[in-house]
Amino acid sequence: MNEQLVQVARALGADGRGILAADESTGTMTKRLAGIDVESTETNRRDYREMLFRTTDALRDHISGVILYDETIRQSAADGTPLVQMITDAGTIPGIKIDRGAKPLAGAPGEKVTEGLDGLRERLAEYYELGARFTKWRAVIDIGRGGDRSIPSAYCIRANAHALARMAALSQEQNLVPIVEPEVLMDGDHDIDRCFEATEWTLKQVYMALYDQRVWLEGSVLKPNMVLSGKGCPVQAAVDEVAEKTVRCLRRGVPAAVPSIVFLSGGQSDVEATAHLNAMNAGYDLPWNLSFSYGRALQAAPLAAWAGKSDNVASAQAAFRHRARMNGLATRGDWSMDLEQEAA
Ligand code: 13P
């Protein structure tokens, strides 16, 4: 039992606040910056993230935690303040991405397993010293195209669940709250019920692996996908159906001992990700805090507004503040399309 872990796990999903996932690997960040014609130098990556973390009112009011990448947790702002300190000064908890990416799973064409366990204990001890109080590990589960039911395979789900549990146990040993992220992808032509089936199966296997490996659920956080229609599915489920099926799936798969569930956005539009979260919090009485840990759905608007120009910093920060506030409202079920448009 470790009270610090419980407090952090609860705080990450505290009412009105959620997580900013700013842990893009250098490869992903390079793609994002290329999209706005900005060269991916260490300074540009720092300037962009510093701009987000300097939106201190948004952090204080709506952002419970920030997930950092290895490069970022070691960086300082232009004025020399460590980025980690800027985050903690705003009353927000720094965390760290600890996986080393999803790689092809041997013997399972088309499926992946996440790597990064070797030497993890030592890396975790260092990240704690650098100020991290939670970790994140993302597993990727694909759904077969054209009705191919061989993907996901039981092998892929079990291999990923095992790795998630390994990292979670090690994180807790080092006094870090693990964010367990099994992402069932929305890419593909599958319908929402196939997503439900794959997500329920994945969650059950993940919680079995966490149990086997003695992970203490009260000091952990789940970061799941929502139950959605595949991007290429001709029938797209409406907000109420997404909320109803996601809640049903989570109730079946996630023990009530888990304090906080924080969704990934996974390629949904900004407003869709907010509307879905809002519908769940407005319509259902749930045993967990239900909040967000968005990357793209929080950053797409400020990234576009910034475009790499210092003249645009204020409008980029306004765009970030707006999305953080809208998602903060959604954690209470208080968001509406009217509020969205009024403030825009
Ligand atoms: P998205 O919200 O863009 O899916 O990213 C969240 C995340 O941290 C994925 O690991």
Image: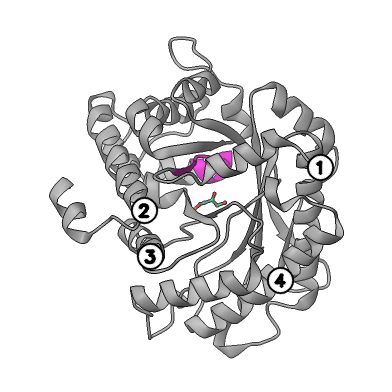
- Tell me the CA gap for discs 2 and 1: 33 Å
Q: Name the residue carrying label 4.
A: 204
Amino acid type, label 1: Leu
- Tell me the CA gap for discs 4 and 1: 21 Å
Label 4 C-beta lies within 8 Å of the nearest ligand 1 atom: no
Q: Answer above or below: position of 114 versus 47.
A: below
The numbered mark, 2 or 4, whose residue comes first in the sequence reads 4
Looking at this view, name the residue that lies furthest to the left.
342
Are the two marked residues, 2 and 1, in contact with CB atoms closer than 8 angstroms?
no
Q: Position of residue 26 (x, y in %)?
A: 57, 38
Left or right: 177 with respect to 272? right
Q: Name the residue carrying label 2.
A: 332
Neighbourhood count class around disc 4 (C-alpha, 10 Å): few under 14, some 14–19, many 20 upward: some
**Could you say which is closer to the camera, residue 3 or residue 202?**
3
The numbered mark, 3 or 1, whose residue comes first in the sequence reads 1
Is residue 26 covered in magenta? yes
Neighbourhood count class around disc 3 (C-alpha, 10 Å): few under 14, some 14–19, many 20 upward: many
Residue stretch in magenta: 18-29
Q: Which of marks 3 and 2 is in front?
A: 2
Is residue 20 covered in magenta? yes
Left or right: 284 with respect to 107? left
